[in-house]
Each structure stands twice: as structure tokens, then as C-alpha cells.
Amino acid sequence: MAGEQTMKRLPPVRQRPAWAALEAHYRKVSGLHLRDLFAADPARGERLAVEAAGIYLDYSKNRITEETLKLLVQLAEQSDLRGRIDAMFRGDKINVTEKRAVLHVALRAPRSASIRVDGEDVVPAVHQVLDRMSAFAERVRGGAWRGHTGKQIRNIVNIGIGGSDLGPVMAYEALKHCSERTMTFRFVSNVDGTDFVEATRDLEPAHTLFIISSKTFTTLETMTNAHDARTWLLTGLGGDMKAVPKHFVAVSTNAEKVKEFGIDPANMFGFWDWVGGRYSMDSAIGLSTMLAIGPDGFQAMLDGFRQVDEHFRAAPFERNLPVLMGLLSVWYCDFFGAQTVAVLPYEQYLKRFPAYLQQLTMESNGKHVTLEGERVDVDTGPIYWGEPGTNGQHSFYQLIHQGTRLIPADFIAFVHSLNPLGRHHDMLLANVLAQTEALAFGKTAEEVKAEGTPDWLVPHRVFEGNRPSNTLLLDSLTPRALGKLVALYEHNVFTQGVIWNIDSFDQWGVELGKVLAQRIIPELESKEEPKLGHDSSTNTLIRRYRKLKGAAS
Ligand code: G6Q
């Protein structure tokens, strides 16, 4: 197994001593109510909080005691979390099924650092690409880079999907307040033609630059949209192929395919196989982000990432933000049977953050076998989901407050609004605090009755409380803060993956559907009635679609 020289073989999760201790401990504490835990310890809210790298994490409203924390930290130690963190930062091939190093942390390493993969220091190459991106971004933003007809670039369209889309979209939305407002940014990902058509319908080709973002440069959706973009551009500019290099740049690891497409390799920004798609928003995949916020803003974002990297690497587990968050997720997922984690940013600019996290968390930890290929003996990968507050309060929060399921929630808030407007921000923050308070403490039947509620209505108005949450408080949503938040969740995911002893960096589960789609496409397109060899459901649906679209005779 690649990487085995540095990674200890771990016993199955349930066989680690701390796991058995946590099971026994769970039986003792699961009935405790947060009301009682707070009543017994008036300083709990100050004590169970950590501040690092400018992030304040209040984790006191979790269903834990000092003993829980001690045992969770022991579990981390018995899972060799320290060794695995070191292995990642050292450039060991910890993505064992793909035999790759996992070095998104190198993307934000300072120039002075040295991180070796197969004997080669990767840091100079990282900075060389960053420098090229910066020079390019300056030229486009400053108007020195012109389109084929000499017009200035006003529109940037990123074409990519999955890891080559979700980060750029999220970062653009998050950092819109410091983006170049005279430019338009669009993102095309879906193979549904609507995505491309809607993204380009009001753009002028002469002013438009496409970034084709694809690590492999073979992805069906991206290449289909890239070809549409080339046709759209050439149609708009009179068909001169010489226009292509002026309006297309690429972010990829596949120079050959980039060239084949007609993009000048000088305008290709590279990255490496040790950057996973969902961990790539701070690589050249972030070119659209840099065009939007400028090289200095991008650098500030990288600094934010780096501060949390350093904290994750050095802080003791009991004061380590991503470690604590990861261990708490394991606690709820495996002991309380919680199936999901809600992420609730109280910052409108973070509206795509939950969608971004869905890929980061679920593509990473949605695995059913260990690094050694054995079935994991506990549940892995909770479902992450969420929406910005306060909107969610008027829809799904009902279930979090009064439903039958336990939904741990991360509330993310900022002290300063980027758009101060009257009393809005105090109202927004009051809602964060009110929600976490209501979730934790609820409202008893006695309290409901005392308000004069008729007996028959009392059960409906009771809030059981004891719903756990974390509150993350940062200063304001700057590029630096965004980098910190993303790194926080990256390392939170890493921590969970180490406990479960799974490969958080492969994604074999996305393959089968892709392969089957390649088989079905010709069956849908063929003029002749195809011979179908699927199950009866798939065969019938194919025939029905063909008939209704008018393909069948
Ligand atoms: C992420 C995945 C996946 C990937 C896309 C796009 O970790 O690997 O989401 O980013 O499938 O791949 P390309 O960048 O190769 O087009």
C-alpha cells in the first residue's frame, strides 16, 4: 500500500480502547440536558470556547462533558491523528488508492517553505504559477490584455464542474463585495444546455474571456460546454480561429489536450495531481477569484488558509479548532446516530458555502471501506447541508427545533457587516444567538403553560431543547477570513477521515454513473432503434424518451 511506510495500520475503529470507553460514556451522558450542564457550571460558556487564527469557536452548546472531550482526544491519539497530519504536511502519499500526495497545504505555503513530493520541492512551482496568475490577472483587470478585435475584456466565464466550479462560484459570491464591479463573472458547469445559454445570453463575445477549468481536460460536461463556448465566440467574431487564444485560457494539468483545443500553452495555468479537485480553489482553479478580487486579495485569502494550516498542525488537540469540530461530528454521527450536519452562515455572501461544503465533506468522507479495503465498522460521512440565516429560520428550522431527529448545527457569524444598514446587523446577530439559545435550552411544558397556553396546545408549543450547535464568530468576511473558514472545514473533514481510517481524497463513487452515461448517450441519439441490454426499468425509460422526443420510428 502506498504511504504505508509512514502510516500506522490502525485497528478497526470499534477496537480502539477509547471507542469502547466512549460507548460506555455515551450511555452515561446521553440523557443529560444542556440546561443542566449549563446550570451546573456557570462558566461553561466561557470555558468551552477556543479562539485561534481570528476564529472564535463556542462549542459549549454541545452535548459533552470534560470527560467526553478527554475521550474524544484519546480517540484521536489512538487513531494516529498526529502522525497523519504530519504525513500530509510532509507530502507522503496518503491518498493511498490513487497513490498520491495530498498537498493542498502546499498551495498556501510561503516561498521560503520546502515540501517534497518524490524528492522534488513543490513550493517553487506553486509560486511560479501564482506569479503567472498575478501577472495575467493584472493585464486583464488593467485592460492590457485585449480580445481579438482589440476590445477590453469585461466578462469572465469560468467553465468547469465539481471541484473546478464549486470553489470558484462560492468564492466569487463570498468576495463579491471586494470584486472588480466593472467586470461580469459567470460560471457554467452543468451539461444542461440551459446553463451555458443563460450564462452567455447577454454577453458580447468581443469582451468575453473563457477560463476552461479542468484538471483532466476530458470531463464530459466541461469539454461539451467549452466547445459550445468556442462556437459561440467564433460565431460572434466572424469565425477567425485566431480569436480563440485571445478569448480562452485554461487551468489544467493536461497541456496536450489544452493545446489540442486551441489554447496557447502560454496561457495555461497548471496545477498538480497532489491537489484534489475539491481542495483546489486556492490553486490556479481560483483564477476567476483572482481576476475578481485581484492578486493582493487572493494573497490575503491564501494567508488566511495558511494561518489555519499552522494552527491545525501545531495546536494541541483539545485547543485545535478543526480537530474539535471533527471529533464532535464523529461523536454525533456515531454515538447519537445523527445523520446530518447543518451549516448555517449568517452572512448573505456565504450563500453558496453550504453547497461548496457538500462536496468537500461528502465526496471526501462518503466512503464505506477503510484504507485497507475492509468495511468500516461504524457510520461515516454525515450529510452536510444548509442555507444562510435568517432565511432558513422561516423554513426548515422547524424540524431542527421540534422534529424527531438530532441535527447538530454550525452557526457562522461575523461581528461586522460588509453592508452596514441601519439596525440590520444587530438584528441578524440577535437571530444567531437566539437560535442557538433556543436549540440548546428550549421551552418546557411548565413555561408554556405559565404563558396561559391551553392544555391541549401545550405539547405543540414545547421545545425540548438539547439540540447541539457550534457558533463560529469572525470579524468580517474578508478574503483572509474566507481562507480561514475553508481551511477550517478542510481539516475538520481530514480529522473525521482519520478517525474512520478512510481515504478522504479519492472519489471512486462518482465513476460508475459516468461510465453508464457514456453507454446510454449513443442509445438515446441513434437513428436506428438500439438493442438495449439494461434492466427493464432503464430499457423502458430509454424507449419512452426516444419515442417522446421523436427519435423512434
Ligand atoms: C473533486 C472531484 C471532481 C472534479 C470534477 C472535475 O475532488 O475530483 O469534482 O473536480 O469531476 O474534474 P476536472 O477538473 O478534471 O474537469
Image: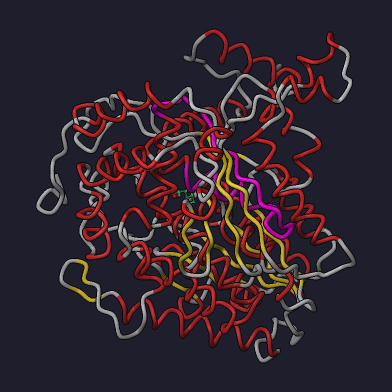
Is residue 335 on the magenta stretch?
yes
Between residue 540 and residue 392, name the one nearer to us: 392
Residue 81 spot, x, y in % from top left: 25, 50
Which residue corresponds to the image point at 25% horizontal and 34% vertical from the top-left?
A: 370
Colour style of the rendered protein structure: secondary structure
**463 up-or-down from 478: above or below:** above
Residue 31 spot, x, y in % from top left: 48, 22
513 sits left or right of 68 in the view: right
Residue lying farthest to the left in this orientation: 5
Q: How many marks?
A: 0
**244 up-or-down from 548: above or below:** below
457 sits left or right of 334 in the view: right
Is residue 552 on the magenta stretch?
no
**From the image, which quarter does the N terminus lie in?**
top left
Between residue 377 and residue 53, name the one nearer to us: 53
401 sits left or right of 522 in the view: right
Residue 11 spot, x, y in % from top left: 16, 33
**226 up-or-down from 478: above or below:** above
Between residue 52 and residue 60, name the one nearer to us: 60
**From the image, which quarter does the C terminus lie in?**
top right
**40 up-or-down from 269: above or below:** above
Which residue corresponds to the image point at 57% horizontal and 84% vertical from the top-left?
A: 296
Which residue corresponds to the image point at 21% horizontal and 71% vertical from the top-left?
A: 116
Q: Which residues are magenta?
A: 334-361
Which residue corresponds to the image point at 29% horizontal and 80% vertical from the top-left?
A: 113
Residue 88 spot, x, y in % from top left: 26, 59
